[in-house]
Amino acid sequence: MALRRPMVAGNWKMNGSAQLAQELFNKFAVKLQNDSAEVVLCPPTIYLESVRQLLEANKEALSGSLVRMGAQNLSQHDFGAYTGEISGQMLKDSGCRYVIIGHSERRRMYGETSDIVAEKFAAAQKHGLTPILCVGESGPARQARRTFEVIAEELDVVIEKNGTMAFDNAIIAYEPLWAVGTGKSATPEQAQEVHAFIRKRLSEVSPFIGENIRILYGGSVTPSNAADLFAQPDVDGGLIGGASLNSSEFLSLCSIAMSA
């Protein structure tokens, strides 16, 4: 079995503040003292510079840990007349290492098709960013037993455009739409079933990729359910929403991942 370093990525969505970033780093400097798990903060774009400055200011205190910065979205375009958009190069220049691609809210609220998601995946990698690709089924799709079909379709579009080997520099986050922001999480068994399916699907083309890619679970992860979720053999950590806005809860999740 591959030694996949667990990851906890905090997606603040359109929440948070510079004060929250400061609170997190104050606690990180005291309690986050090993690199057994990678921690990624994905604040709103306007706070990326604040987080970058805190990373620099706390470099010595965090030298034994892995804290990174990521963005919540990027444009599929490199430059041009796209008011309000942000390119991969801009994110790279700001200090980002990761970027969330295809979050369910982007797909559902802003009309991002799987083709657009595949283009954004390519744009992220072009500029040296590691995409965190989100996939997941709706409640009706799960009830109709179409979970695997939906996820396969979302993966296949990205694979067709970028090739399976592109996943050598990527992370996948399984986020069932019926669990995101609802307080209702998938059971550990449900999460493991889907994560194993994703891993097997990629392994069919590249055993190396299938074995080594990190697959996160996202959807109402809290300190009370994280240990059971992260203990599953194909769950490599979490993409955290609401709990990432509470510094104590988020640090607890980081600790759980480090001991998983």
Image (tube, rainbow, N blue to C red):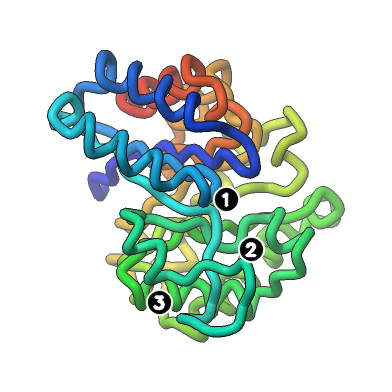
Measuring 45% from the left and 35% from the top, which residue is drawn there?
232
Asked if labels 2 and 1 touch by Cβ distance under 8 angstroms, the answer is yes
Q: Using a 10 Å C-alpha cutoff, classify the residue at mark 2 as few (fewer than 14 neighbours), some (14 to 19) or many (20 or more).
A: some
Disc 2 to disc 3, how far (Cα)?
A: 15 Å
Q: Which residue is mark 2?
A: 151
Q: Which labelled disc corresponds to residue 164? A: 3
Q: Amino acid at mark 3?
A: Thr
Task: Please state if 91 lies on the left or on the right of 134 as rendered.
Answer: left
Residue 119 falls in image quadrant: bottom right
Q: Amino acid at mark 2?
A: Ile
The percent position of residue 255, horizontal first and vertical second, equals 36, 21
* Residue 191 appears in the rendering: no
Task: Please state if 204 lies on the left or on the right of 135 as rendered.
Answer: left
The percent position of residue 58, horizontal first and vertical second, equals 22, 29
The percent position of residue 61, horizontal first and vertical second, equals 17, 24
Residue closest to the eye, 120 or 21: 21
Task: Please state if 43 lies on the left or on the right of 70 as rendered.
Answer: right
Disc 3 to disc 1, how far (Cα)?
A: 18 Å
* Residue 257 appears in the rendering: yes
For the C terminus, the quadrant is: top left
Q: SS at mark 1?
A: strand
For marks 3 and 1, the one nearer the N-term is 3
Q: SS at mark 2?
A: helix
Asked if labels 1 and 3 touch by Cβ distance under 8 angstroms, the answer is no
Measuring 76% from the left and 69% from the top, which residue is drawn there?
111
Q: SS at mark 3?
A: helix
Q: Amino acid at mark 1?
A: Tyr
Q: Which residue is mark 1?
A: 174
Q: Using a 10 Å C-alpha cutoff, classify the residue at mark 1 as few (fewer than 14 neighbours), some (14 to 19) or many (20 or more).
A: many
The percent position of residue 81, horizontal first and vertical second, equals 60, 83
